[in-house]
Amino acid sequence: MLALVTGGAGVVGRALCRELMSRGVCVRVLTLPGDTLAGSLPPEVEVFYGDVTQAETLQDAFKGVDVVFHLAAILLSTQKGSFDKINGEGTRNVVDAAVKAGVSRFLYVSSISVTYPVLTEYGQSKLKGESIVKSAGEVKGLSWTIVRPTLVIGHGGGVEYNMFASYVKKFPVYFMPGGGKCLKRPVRSVDLVQGIASAGLSENAVGKTYALAGSRTMTMAEMAKAVLRQNGMRHLMVPVPWWISRKLAVLKSWIGGRPVTAEQALAGFLYDANPSIDAAFRDLNYQPSAPL
């Protein structure tokens, strides 16, 4: 079996490559031209270069492929239209290339943020990607599976979590929008990668969508305390009501900095991400460990 991992030179992508090879799967990676991280892939991995926003650069990478794991995406951006261009229309190009090449299985890595009551641009782009994948199943017969990771922590990923951890460690006193009551179910990167691999290879998963979360629910305040405890710090949290948080644009620079909009930075503090993983356990034997 030959698997193509788009975005496979990224941190999670490289871990997925190793996981797939441990299961006896041959692996090919699609990554951006000039991506120096491709040099850190195992030598057994075949590397193709292309850009998901440029359909003409993709087709060669899909030849002979049995299953696609579509990870390529952007998580943070302040450039208008970039989320839709890469996460939305880029997914359309990848799906079209897979269908044209006769790929039989397609695994799309979405995000739990598509379940938020109010979607950020990132969430909208990921939901659009889901719609494109499902439509290809209905119209073109593509066998698809969608996974929705929660907040990823640990070695092998965790951009959002690392931003959060850096924020609470940065100052002796840190402000917590909404008092940190928002519920999260963070997932260790090693558990996430195993879940992605199982979902993409299991026939039980065809036509289904799974939340891939950790084994424990935590509040944002509890997560902050855990981060500080792990680093031997005793910083003071100051709760900030939501109406003040929305007005304090400075929180954007404290929480996320330049790569993220204030809307996206605050969304993680506002909306719960505490999904059930019962379906993944039942179909994939997904049994994540405690996150922290």
Image (cartoon, grey):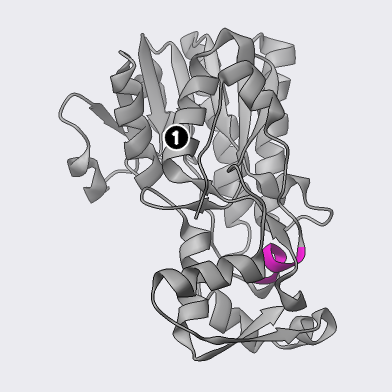
Please identify the residue farthest to the left as the structure is shown: 43
Q: Residue at x 62, y 67 (%)?
A: 222
Front in this rendered view, residue 115 or 173: 173
Front in this rendered view, residue 67 or 219: 219
- The question of residue 283 being in magenta is answered with no
Q: Residue at x 46, y 16 (%)?
A: 67
Let me know if residue 276 appears in the view: yes
Let me know if residue 132 appears in the view: no
Give the x, y percent position of residue 40: 19, 43
Can you say whether 265 is above or below 118 in the image? below
Report the residue marked by disc 1.
193
Front in this rendered view, residue 123 or 22: 22
Q: Residue at x 54, y 30 (%)?
A: 287
Give the x, y percent position of residue 21: 29, 21
Give the x, y percent position of residue 258: 51, 76
Q: Amino acid at mark 1?
A: Val
The residue segment tinted magenta is 264-270
Can you say whether 34 is above or below 46 in the image? below
Please state if 152 lies on the left or on the right of 278 as rendered.
left
Q: Residue at x 41, y 69 (%)?
A: 230
Please state if 52 lies on the left or on the right of 113 as rendered.
left
Secondary structure at numbered mark 1: helix
Please state if 104 lies on the left or on the right of 184 as rendered.
left
Give the x, y percent position of residue 24: 30, 13
Can you say whether 239 is above or below 146 in the image? below
